[in-house]
Image (tube, coloured by chain):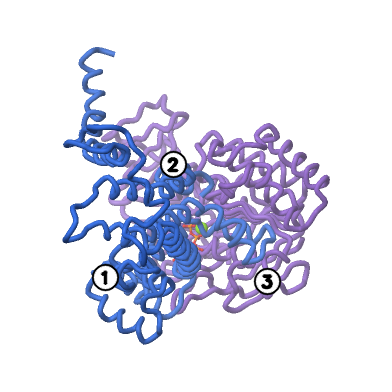
Chain colours: A blue, B purple
């Protein structure tokens, strides 16, 4: 390879590095700031410390506030509920919308698309009255249900797209091979769209885990029903200077499960972006 | 297994996919469905497989009506154009899947899958996933999967159309040999007429959902019953020109501007007195002949062994095959001899043959 070619080959990397840099710096600062007593700009000054992580032992906001573990558990509950419900319902709805022709199919599809594009903020007040009427205001279940509702249109469309890519011939082949409808669905179709379900599970979990607007709106203050993002907001106060060290430490804490989840689904996700169903189809 | 289709019809609202097809397939016979794209070949096959329910009509296996029998109860194997392998399963799992569903004992599954794979020459690929196989290998896996349960009827839906020309040739003879060896009744869908001519015991020519002919390849080729069959079968295709008959001194003449041919009495008698009729004659029945009828060469296409000549007599074109050593060129004048013993005649309105009905 000539020198000129080498330089040209490096250009894409340079562009990628530059565009990723701001994000990288953000995470870098998050890490630094959580473990040092003081920072100046992006650099740590002073000693390394674990004091910012004291929130793990006791609430930094004093009595009356839930412990971090309680909040984490709440968040986990909402995120898991969302993941399971969204994946399950979307997979079933997506299959139906992709494979069956029934009256109202077209309008159902366009309706979900509209709902997906709908600015959810405008619905908050209406939902508030609904939740209160159902007695679900200020409950974890209420928050989780609303979140599921907002995630579902996206999930259904994603799943429908994956089912659309499963060839009819494959289903027919399985039927002729002697499988029942249920066996076809379970043994043939679901395994081939596993990457899609993993992707949706990841999206749903992350959006549940990071949710702020809906938990903030439909629970009271940072009470027993708070989620991590809402809890994090308590550090912002009008009277006391913000303890950025503690904020970043909680942020780091919140990041851990997402990172773990991502590591386990990474292969599947890459597979999906590399073209979904390879071969055979 | 003996298969009978009786007035088999499939409609979707106003769309007619298959229009009242009647045919019977003998045990061990290899029948090819031949027709242009969209004529209803796949639809017919899927009704035989039990995937589609017929709108009206009956399908019989060995005399038993199977219209209501689910695919799994029909004891058939099918090979798809897209192969339709299960991408998440290995070759071994793909081939053994039908046996697994039948709850065959494990040892037997293993033995039968291995045997079929060896026959198909893919015994060494058992642990691969379909994505890591070539098109030809995937095709063999699909065939193995269809064969492993030893079905009474094999269905093929254009199984070779995704392969390159060479591979198609070798797979063609391999499938045919396998079918003869195993004696399994087979229906083979294709729009490649060479495949149809070489493989079929009988060819069913289908157009617009209707059965046009159901006969041996030689019959279909030599005695086309409709204009459609005559046009569709044969490559390069048959030449057509409108002629009118007249009788001169007891001999029958077919004529149009610039063209006058003496037609043997056995053929001419059936076509005479009908006014204008469509005459058809195959390229191989036209030769370059110094005593023939003059025409002008309009185009020359080298095909390797032969040259395909497009010759014009006044306003009608005739294609013929000529020896390259004649070195004919565009613009040359040639004289053409017609082997009228092989000429075909069709009614222009009904498009039916005047000779073979
Ligand atoms: N599910 C369906 N709904 C409506 N029309 C259909 C359906 N399936 C097939 N058709 C129509 O029925 C006709 C026959 O289709 P079919 O698939 O049997 O053709 P084919 O002979 O297999 O063609 P090809 O050689 O292209 O595979 C076509 O006109 C097609 O548009
Ligand atoms: Mg077809």
Which label sits in the foreground, 3 or 1? Answer: 1
Neighbours of disc 2 within 10 Å: few (<14), some (14-19), many (20+): some
- Kindly identify which chain the residue marked by label 1 belongs to: A
Residue at 24% x, 49% y is A243
Report x, y in % for residue B291: 41, 37
Q: Rounded to the nearest whole Å, what is the CA distance between mark 3 and mark 1?
A: 55 Å
* Mark 3 neighbour density, 10 Å: few (under 14) some (14–19) many (20 or more): many
Residue B23 at x, y percent in the picture: 65, 67
Tag 3 secondary structure: strand
Classify residue A233 as left or right of residue A189: left
Say which label, 3 or 2, has the lower sequence index.
3
The spot of residue A127 in percent (x, y) is: 31, 79
Say if disc 2 is inside 8 Å of ligand 1.
no
Q: Are marks 1 and 2 on the same chain?
A: no
Which residue shows up at 78% across the image and 57% down it? Answer: B103
Disc 3 vs disc 2: which is toward the camera? 3
Residue A74 appears anywhere in the view? yes
| Viewer-closest of A237 and B258 | A237
Q: Quadrant of the N terminus of chain B?
A: bottom right
Pointers 1 and 2 in contact (CB under 8 A)? no
> Can you identify the residue that label 3 sits on?
B59
Q: Which residue is mark 1?
A: A120
Dots 3 and 2: beta carbons under 8 Å?
no
User: Where the C terminus of chain B falls, by quadrant?
Assistant: bottom right
Residues flagged by tags 3 and 2 on a common chain: yes
Q: Nearer the viewer, residue B38 or B294?
A: B38
Residue A206 drawn above or below residue B57? above
The residue pinned by badge 2 equals B337
């Amino acid at each position: 390879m000539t020198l000129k070619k080498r330089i040209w080959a490096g250009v894409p990397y340079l562009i990628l590095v530059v565009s990723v840099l701001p994000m990288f710096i953000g995470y870098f600062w998050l890490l630094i700031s959580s473990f040092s007593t003081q920072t100046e700009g992006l650099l740590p000054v002073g000693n390394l410390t674990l004091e910012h992580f004291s929130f793990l032992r006791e609430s930094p906001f004093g009595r009356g506030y839930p412990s971090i573990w309680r909040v984490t558990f709440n968040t986990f509950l909402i995120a898991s509920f969302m993941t399971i419900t969204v994946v399950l319902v979307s997979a079933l709805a997506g299959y139906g919308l992709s494979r069956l022709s029934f009256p109202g199919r077209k309008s159902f599809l366009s309706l979900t698309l509209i709902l997906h594009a709908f600015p959810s903020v405008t619905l908050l007040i209406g939902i508030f009255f609904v939740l209160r009427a159902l007695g679900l205001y200020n409950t974890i279940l209420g928050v989780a249900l609303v979140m599921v509702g907002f995630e579902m249109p996206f999930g259904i469309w994603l799943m429908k797209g994956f089912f659309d890519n499963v060839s009819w011939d494959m289903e027919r082949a399985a039927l002729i091979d002697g499988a029942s409808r249920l066996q076809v669905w379970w043994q043939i179709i679901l395994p081939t769209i596993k990457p899609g379900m993993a992707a949706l599970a990841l999206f749903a979990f992350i959006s549940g885990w990071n949710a702020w607007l809906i938990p903030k709106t439909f629970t009271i203050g940072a009470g027993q029903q708070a989620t991590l993002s809402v809890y994090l907001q308590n550090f912002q106060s009008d009277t006391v200077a913000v303890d950025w060290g503690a904020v970043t430490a909680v942020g780091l804490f919140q990041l851990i499960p997402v990172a773990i989840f991502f590591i386990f689904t990474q292969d599947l996700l890459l597979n999906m972006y590399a073209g979904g169903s390879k071969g055979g189809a | 297994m003996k298969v009978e289709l009786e007035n088999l019809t499939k409609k979707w609202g106003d769309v007619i996919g298959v229009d009242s097809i009647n045919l019977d397939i003998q045990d061990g016979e290899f029948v090819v469905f031949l027709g242009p794209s969209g004529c209803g070949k796949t639809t017919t096959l899927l009704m035989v497989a039990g995937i589609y329910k017929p709108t009206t009509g009956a399908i019989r296996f060995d005399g038993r009506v199977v219209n209501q029998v689910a695919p799994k109860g029909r004891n058939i194997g099918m090979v798809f154009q897209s192969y339709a392998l299960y991408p998440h399963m290995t070759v071994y799992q793909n081939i053994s899947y039908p046996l697994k569903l039948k709850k065959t004992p494990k040892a037997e599954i293993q033995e039968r899958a291995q045997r079929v794979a060896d026959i198909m020459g893919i015994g060494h690929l058992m642990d691969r996933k379909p994505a890591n196989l070539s098109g030809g290998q995937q095709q063999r896996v699909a065939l193995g999967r269809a064969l492993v349960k030893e079905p009474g009827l094999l269905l093929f839906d254009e199984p070779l159309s995704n392969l390159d020309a060479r591979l198609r040739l070798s797979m063609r003879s391999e499938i045919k040999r396998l079918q003869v060896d195993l004696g399994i009744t087979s229906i083979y869908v294709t729009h490649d007429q060479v495949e149809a001519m070489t493989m079929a015991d009988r060819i069913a020519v289908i157009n617009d959902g209707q059965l046009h002919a159901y006969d041996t390849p030689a019959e279909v080729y030599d005695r086309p019953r409709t204009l459609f069959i005559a046009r569709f079968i044969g490559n390069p295709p048959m030449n057509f020109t409108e002629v009118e008959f007249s009788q001169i001194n007891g001999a029958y003449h077919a004529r149009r501007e610039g063209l006058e041919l003496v037609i043997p009495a056995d053929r001419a008698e059936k076509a005479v007195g009908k006014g204008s009729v469509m005459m058809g004659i195959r390229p191989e029945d036209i030769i370059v002949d110094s005593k023939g009828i003059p025409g002008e060469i309009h185009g020359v296409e080298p095909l390797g062994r032969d040259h395909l000549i497009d010759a014009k007599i006044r306003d009608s074109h005739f294609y013929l095959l000529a020896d390259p050593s004649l070195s004919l060129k565009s613009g040359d004048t040639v004289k053409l001899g017609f082997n009228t013993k092989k000429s075909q005649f069709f009614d222009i309105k009904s498009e039916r043959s005047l000779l073979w009905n």
